[in-house]
Amino acid sequence: MSKILYQLLPIIVSLSLLAYILFLIRRHRVRQRYVYLWMLLGIGMLVLSIYPRAAFSVSNLLGFKSPSNLLLVACSVFLLLTVINLSTAISRLEEDRRRLVEEIALLDVRLRAIESEIQSKS
């Protein structure tokens, strides 16, 4: 029983991740730009869950002594890429916010000038 559970649990987790990603896509909660990265992760998890020997083959091919070391390095790289991607998105949003605040300030000045012209004509 426990051997079957150990084989099915990673498959269930991988399928759940893929289902959740599809749910987020349908609800427009995640941008398409980020979906590819998460779908790639989910598909990779599913493949390794179905064919666990592939992890041993890939780790031997790349010179890792254990598949867990390969998994640790792959997860670290994935998280690093995600952080870099999100940092660039945050930087872009901060620049957009700064530009919008400047535009609002300029529009506010124009509005006050128009209001004072109207009041002086009345």
Image (cartoon, grey):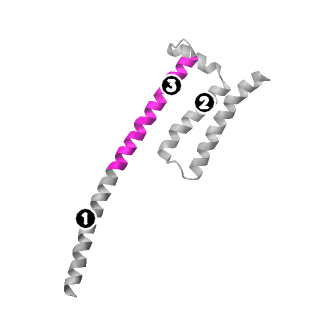
Tag 2: amino acid: Met
Q: Which mark is residue 45?
A: 2
Q: Which mark is residue 106?
A: 1
The picture quadrant where one finds residue 4 is top right
Q: Residue 39 in the image: x percent, y percent?
A: 56, 38
Residue 26 located left or right of residue 96: right
Residue found at the very far bottom of the displayed protein: 122
What SS does tag 2 mark? helix
Q: Residue 65 in the image: x percent, y percent?
A: 54, 11
* Mark 3 / mark 1, whichever is N-terminal: 3
* Mark 2 / mark 1, whichever is N-terminal: 2
Task: Please state, as top left, top right, bottom left or bottom right, where the C terminus lies in the image.
Answer: bottom left
Provide the major secondary structure of the magenta segment. Answer: helix
Q: Nearer the viewer, residue 108 or 26?
A: 108
Question: Is residue 102 inside the magenta stretch?
Answer: no
Q: Residue 83 in the image: x percent, y percent?
A: 43, 35
Residue 10 located left or right of residue 36: right
Residue sitting at x 50%, y 12%: 63
- State the CA–CA distance, disc 2 to disc 1: 51 Å
Residue sitting at x 50%, y 47%: 32
Residue sitting at x 48%, y 26%: 76
What is the magenta range? 67-94
